[in-house]
Amino acid sequence: MITKEAIDSVLGSTAYDTSHKKIGKVGQVYVDEQTGQPEWMTVRTGLFGKKEAIVPLEPAQVDGDEVRLPFQKEQITNAPHVDVDAAGHLSEQDEAQMYDYYGMRHPTIPPGTADRTEAMTRSEERMHVGKERETSHAHLRKYVVTEEQQQTVPVHKEKVRLEREPISEKNRGQAAAPEISEADDEMVRQEERPVVAKETVPVERVRLAKDATTEQQTAGGQVRKERIDADGVQE
């Protein structure tokens, strides 16, 4: 328990939860107006410590420049917001609400006289979706394939035919003298044939390039939540 003599050492100290997670700096300490003993303190939470959560001091322990609280960080950061007046007082209703929230008995209510049970804390899991970067590799590879190609080209051929011309009065003078003998004659015949020739030529340049795109993807999972039911309660 923190006494009023230790108030100065508590102010500005760092508060930690039951798992020794850092919660924030202690901002203010409020004392009981009847006993003068420290009763509540505020802890700066949230971004840049702009939010202050009210925490009971009765179960807190001081260890050097640390104030250790027997509560989870999430419970403290999610504590209900209550108003503190200019004199540093909480209303009885707000005090009762805060003691119920932290599961503590109000110190002004003697044991056995309370008309309600100790508060039960309900917890639930919260899902936080982040991102991780995955790296993969792309390779540029050149290999050789063989494919069949065909082209049709016109080719010219010479064909030898036999012409017969009967001897007549018109061509008799051109005919050789009649004589039984052997003879031989020759004619050169030409034709074209397709010939395939190959050459290697550059046709394109290929390289790897990267483009950055943004797309929406959904990530999900199951979260557990506690529910509290009561038996024998009359509405």
Image: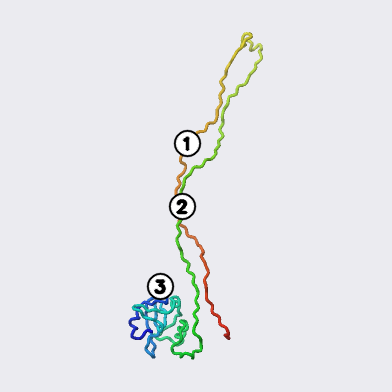
Amino acid type, callout 3: Leu
* Total marks in image: 3
Q: Are marks 3 and 1 in contact (CB under 8 Å)?
A: no
**Local secondary structure at mark 3:** helix
| Residue 50 visible to the viewer | no
Q: Which residue is mark 3?
A: 47
Q: Which residue is mark 2?
A: 138
The residue mark sitting in front, 3 or 2, is 2
Q: Quadrant of residue 35?
A: bottom left
| Residue 1 sits above or below residue 219 on the image | below
Q: Are marks 3 and 2 in contact (CB under 8 Å)?
A: no
Give the mark nearer the N terminus: 2 vs 1. Answer: 2
**Local secondary structure at mark 1:** loop
Depth check, front residue: 45 or 228? 228
Horizontal side of 76 relative to 229 (left or right) equals left
Amino acid type, callout 2: Ala
Residue 44 lies, in percent from the top left, at 39, 77
Rendered-image quadrant of the N terminus:
bottom left
Q: Are marks 2 and 1 in contact (CB under 8 Å)?
A: no
Q: Which residue is mark 1?
A: 199
Depth check, front residue: 229 or 89? 229
Depth check, front residue: 89 or 17? 17
- Residue at (52, 72) in percent of width and height: 224
Q: Which mark is residue 8?
A: none
